[in-house]
Image (cartoon, rainbow, N blue to C red):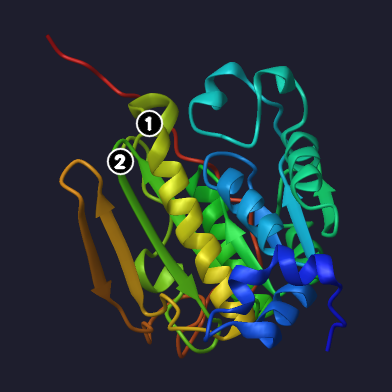
Amino acid sequence: MINFTEKQLERYSRHIILKDVGIEGQAKIMNGKVLIIGAGGLGSPAALYLAAAGVGTIGIVDSDTVELSNLQRQIIHFTKDLYTPKATSAAEKMAALNPEVTIKTYYTFVSADNIRGIIREYDFVIDGTDNFAAKFLINDACVMEGIPFSHGGILRFNGQTMTVLPEESACLRCVFEGPPPRNAVPTCAQAGVLGAIAGLLGTIQTSEALKFLTGAGTLLTDSMLFFDILTMEFIKHKLGKNRECGLCGEEPTIQELIDEQQPVCDLKTTN
């Protein structure tokens, strides 16, 4: 058990007075290790709230630098951070918010060669990436390593998310066999996204990480949550493990990680 200082008791008091968290739950948070892959729209709120919560070790993986178009939704980055590595920019804000947390930065792409070595140091992974190839790579690596993770995706005014507990619940490939074909789904850069959507989904993913660490509540497993912010409709579809899943089914065919090519969508407009 952590011996809380007076300042820590004050900093985390709103967690500690929660019946389902308490002093023991806060201690679990402070001993926890969470990895965020992607310091963009989803990773920005996740990084800030994980640091605020006092998660002991937070990893940030991102190979990009801050661009002006990022600032509409990637709230952890400021105008002064333009052209700075996103992982560095994020770590600076997190440390300023809570100097007690340990922050590890990885200025790299996740790939079939490095992802398993990175994620196995953590208790939970938050997928904040913006392309399908990375999302399926994260899914496959986490299932192979037995590490729980939160999947999330946004586009235009919509979002979707689910939590995966390897060997217990459906994985992403149980729902979608693989990345969509070329021209099936546009990217945010091509179709746009309402900035606040990223904050909404990123905080849901963070809540799942904190629930996992503390054991509070029920995780979003065997379900996919969809929302449309234009109509303010939230729909949760029940799922189940797919016995024919190529990754976690009864006769898996995916035995090793591969770097799939990211499908590119060429949006066409007509008069």
Residue drawn at (75%, 80%), measured in percent from left and top?
27
The three-letter code of the residue at mark 2 reads Ala
Whether 129 is drawn above or below 220: the answer is above
**Residue identified by numbered label 1:** 265
Q: Are marks 2 and 1 in contact (CB under 8 Å)?
A: yes
Q: Mark 2 packing: few (<14 Cα in 10 Å), some, or many (20+)?
A: few
Q: Is residue 193 left or right of residue 143?
A: left
Q: Position of residue 192 (x, y in %)?
A: 36, 28
* Residue 33 in view: no
Q: Residue at x 71, y 52 (%)?
A: 111
Q: Is residue 131 left or right of residue 49?
A: left
Residue drawn 15% across and 46% down?
A: 231
The quarter of the image holding the C terminus is top left
Q: Is residue 135 above or below residue 190?
A: below
Q: Position of residue 228 (x, y in %)?
A: 23, 48
Mark-to-mark CA distance, 2 and 1: 7 Å
Answer whether residue 153 is visible to the viewer in this image. yes
Residue at (33% x, 83% y) in the render:
240
Mark 2 or mark 1: name the one nearer the start of the chain.
Answer: 2
Q: Quadrant of residue 143?
A: bottom right
Looking at the image, residue 207 sits to the left or right of residue 114; the answer is: left
User: Which residue does the numbered mark 2 point to in the structure image?
Assistant: 184
Determine whether the residue tagged by mark 1 lies in a helix, strand or loop: loop
- Which element carries disc 2, helix, strand or loop? loop
Which numbered disc covers residue 91? none
Instruction: Look at label 1 and name its amino acid.
Output: Cys
